[in-house]
Amino acid sequence: MRRRSRSRRALVLFAVACALCAVAAAGQNGVRARDDQRAARRGAVRSVTIPVVISVPPVRERGSEELRPVGLTVREDGEREEILATRSEAEHAPLYLAVFVQDDLIPPASNEIATLANFIRRLPEGSYVMVGYLRVGSVQIRQKFTSDLERAAKALRIPAGTPTAGPYNPYLSLVEGMRRFQSQPLGRRAVLAVTDGLDISRGVENSLASQSTDLQRAVGEAQRRGVAVYSIFTPTANTSNNLTLVGNAQGALARLSDETGGRAFFQGTGAPVSFDPFLRELSDRLDKQIALTYLSTHADKGFHKINLEAALEGTQLAYPAGYTRK
């Protein structure tokens, strides 16, 4: 009986020991798995550069607005990320601006070409400008990126103003135009699009901001390349007398600008009397634009949401909603 009892105890102890070994091994495997995940995550980190417009509240005691430390914090997908650099014009980060004009705008737009040209001439020295026209089938580049602002201003011409000159839809042409940023250094990037913003290539329903596939492509292209898109709504023959289409087109432009850190400018439902007020505000915003570079630790493909906060109370920030990693 004693021998049987000892044998049973030995078997029980052996079983317990095996179980403990299994638990320990599982724990080590779990630790290894976590370590592997962390290592993979570290190996997938990369820098992301986005355009940010910083508007600080006025200094009451001086009655003016000045550049002050705002204490930026950046989060990607809810997790705080490390800021590597913030570069402004004063820190040798020149502006790269592409100006695109839709070629089938109604005749009143012709009166604003001189206003656009003067806007280009007044840009800070060292800025680079590209000029193109959104046309049927593609974008016509009349001037590649150049720091010769006078040359860029002279590249502007009066729009053709005929429906046959218009693009298939403006967003496909914008995507093609934004690819020209590929050969330019990362930094302060922006697009000014003078367009009706209407995409009826797949029917009227497709002109809604939530339905246009090519609008989404334009948003994604701008976010991926760190380009803030500013737009001035100007009618074409398609939108000059149709309030439904005007509303859809303006909604699409608002989405394009909001999700890329830009601004959409409208003057009611018709052609603007003058571009000048819009261009003055645009100049002010571009003066306040910085290029912010941070370290992204999210390796997953798909959309990654960006959120910025400023420690300085009252600071207003304009930046892209996120980007898509392929």
Image: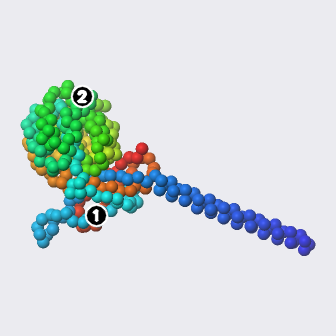
Badge 2 or badge 1: first in the primary sequence: 2
Q: Is residue 196 visible?
A: no
In the rendered view, tell whether residue 262 sits above or below residue 4: above
Instruction: Identify the residue at image location x=74%, y=67%.
Output: 17
- Residue 293's image quarter? bottom left
Please, what is the three-letter code of the amino acid marked with disc 1? Ala
Give the label on residue 136, or none: 2
Measured from the top left, where is residue 243 in percent x and y?
Answer: 18, 38
Instruction: Identify the residue at image location x=31%, y=41%.
Output: 182
Instruction: Identify the residue at image location x=38%, y=46%.
Output: 324
Give the label on residue 77, or none: none
Q: How far is disc 2 from disc 1 in space, using C-alphas? A: 43 Å
Measured from the top left, where is residue 126 in percent x and y?
Answer: 18, 48
Looking at the rendered structure, the number of numbered marks drawn on it comes to 2
- Residue 152's image quarter? top left
- The residue at which mark 1 appears reads as 310
Q: Residues within 10 Å of mark 2 (few under 14, many from 20)?
A: some
